Amino acid sequence: MKALFLNCTLKKSPRVSNTRALIDKVAAIMEGLGVETEVLRVVDYDIAFGVSSDEGGGDQWPLVYEKIRAADIIVVATPIWFGVRSSLAQLVMERLDGSYADGDPKTGQYPLYGKVAGVIVTGNEDGAHAAAATTLFNLSHLGCVVPPNCDCYWVGDAGPGPSYIEAGGGQHMYTNKTARFLAHNVVYMAGLMRENPLPTNIRKLTEEARAESRDTCPVRHGEGA
């Protein structure tokens, strides 16, 4: 079983990332459960803006997308900027919109269908709940399974100040507790999904819905296309 962590820090390698520090804590717990982990720092890739799986012209999103498709567990990790998730976390979601068009020819299931989602957030002040809620909602719509207690976050005091590493976030009880909840629940759920894949036939259900609907919703998201 493999877990992919998408570190959406704005800091390029090899700069120290507070988000990476919390990722490492969660990843270590998963590895203790027998899971192979990989951390990908999104900012180190030349990713174009767009909503397709390949925007061409040297776009490196296909390299990231391939790793996402190969993973059983996807954890999006983001710092908070201006009270919301980072622009790179937003970019990841926008590019994953293209995955709707890559549905299974028979069922229409999207490439992320049945993968298990988690989220990690770091930053100062507030914004952790909003970042986690929006990100998990997005991943659910893309086909991911969202288990209980699959978020972990650390936030510091209001205003500029020390972040996770400098502030000693590694000793924060609530964050350490939720790191364990996240790791154990996503790993367990991924095992269930591997043994019991979702049978949903998106193509069939879309046609049923279209047959009883007055409006003519355009075909998208791989629904019967």
Image: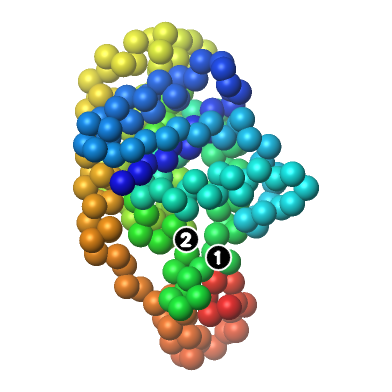
Instruction: Kindly identify which residue carries mark 2.
Output: 111
Question: Can you give x and y, in whole percent of width and height, for residue 95 in the image?
Answer: 60, 51
Question: Can you give x and y, in whole percent of width and height, for residue 141 in the image?
Answer: 45, 59
User: Which residue type does callout 1 highlight?
Assistant: Asp
Question: Can you give x and y, in whole percent of width and height, for residue 105 in the image?
Answer: 50, 75
For this orientation, the residue located farthest to the right is 57
Q: Please say whether residue 189 is visible from this viewpoint.
A: yes
Question: Can you give x and y, in whole percent of width and height, for residue 48 in the image?
Answer: 70, 44
Residue 221 falls left or right of residue 31:
right
Of the numbered discs in the image, which one, if any, rests on residue 94?
none
- Point out the image quarter for the C terminus: bottom right
Where is 92 relative to 223, above or below?
above
Query: At x 56% / y 44%, what residue is drawn?
Result: 64
Residue 46 falls left or right of residue 154:
right
Q: Please say whether residue 178 is visible from this viewpoint.
A: no
The answer to whether the residue labelled 1 contacts the one labelled 2, judged by CB atoms less than 8 Å apart, is yes
Of the numbered discs in the image, which one, if any, rests on residue 102?
1
Query: At x 37% / y 25%, what residue is drawn?
Result: 24
For this orientation, the residue located farthest to the bottom is 211
Color theme of the render: rainbow
Where is 100 relative to 8, above or below?
below
User: Which residue type does callout 2 highlight?
Assistant: Pro
Query: In what element is the residue under mark 2?
Result: loop
Question: How many numbered tags mark residues here?
Answer: 2
Res 129 → quadrant: top left
Nearest the viewer among 77 and 123 is 77
Query: At x 39% / y 77%, what residue is drawn?
Result: 201
